[in-house]
Amino acid sequence: MKNRIVRGVAGSFILISLLLAVYVNINWLWFTAFVGANLFQSSLTKWCLLEDILKKFGIKE
């Protein structure tokens, strides 16, 4: 369950930031890069901040 939420949030952030980059300001692509870098980092370290936040809200695996 938690992995699906993390993937959904990351995908939503990427799509929203791409839309903002096209329609508002191209600098929103930095947010897209930030999300991508966090996904890459979590694949290497097996640690994800969003998972810790979801755990504090009581969402279980």
Image (cartoon, rainbow, N blue to C red):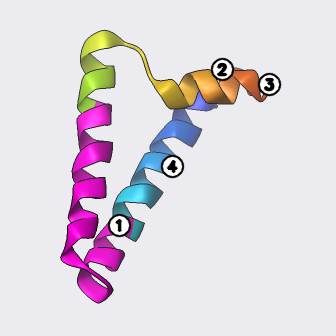
Look at the numbered discs 2 and 1 and tell me whether their residues touch, using CB distance below 8 Å: no
Q: Amino acid at mark 2?
A: Glu
Q: Quadrant of the N terminus?
A: top right
Residues under labels 3 and 4: Cα distance? 18 Å
Residues under labels 3 and 2: Cα distance? 10 Å
- Name the residue beneath numbered marker 4: 8
Q: Secondary structure at mark 3?
A: loop
Q: Is residue 36 above or below residue 16?
A: above
Q: Callout 3: 10 Å neighbours few (<14), some, many (20+)?
A: few
Residues under labels 1 and 3: Cα distance? 28 Å
Q: Is residue 30 above or below residue 58?
A: below
Q: Nearer the viewer, mark 3 or mark 4?
A: 3
Look at the numbered discs 4 and 1 and tell me whether their residues touch, using CB distance below 8 Å: no
- N-term-proximal mark, 4 vs 1: 4
Give the numbered dot on residue 61. 2
Residue 9 horizontal side relative to residue 58, left or right: left
Q: As rendered, which of 22 and 59 lies closer to the eye?
A: 22
Q: Secondary structure at mark 4?
A: helix
Q: Nearer the viewer, mark 3 or mark 2?
A: 3
Q: Callout 4: 10 Å neighbours few (<14), some, many (20+)?
A: few
- Name the residue beneath numbered marker 1: 17
- N-term-proximal mark, 2 vs 1: 1
Look at the numbered discs 1 and 3 and tell me whether their residues touch, using CB distance below 8 Å: no
Q: Position of residue 18 (x, y in %)?
A: 29, 70
Q: Nearer the viewer, mark 2 or mark 1?
A: 1
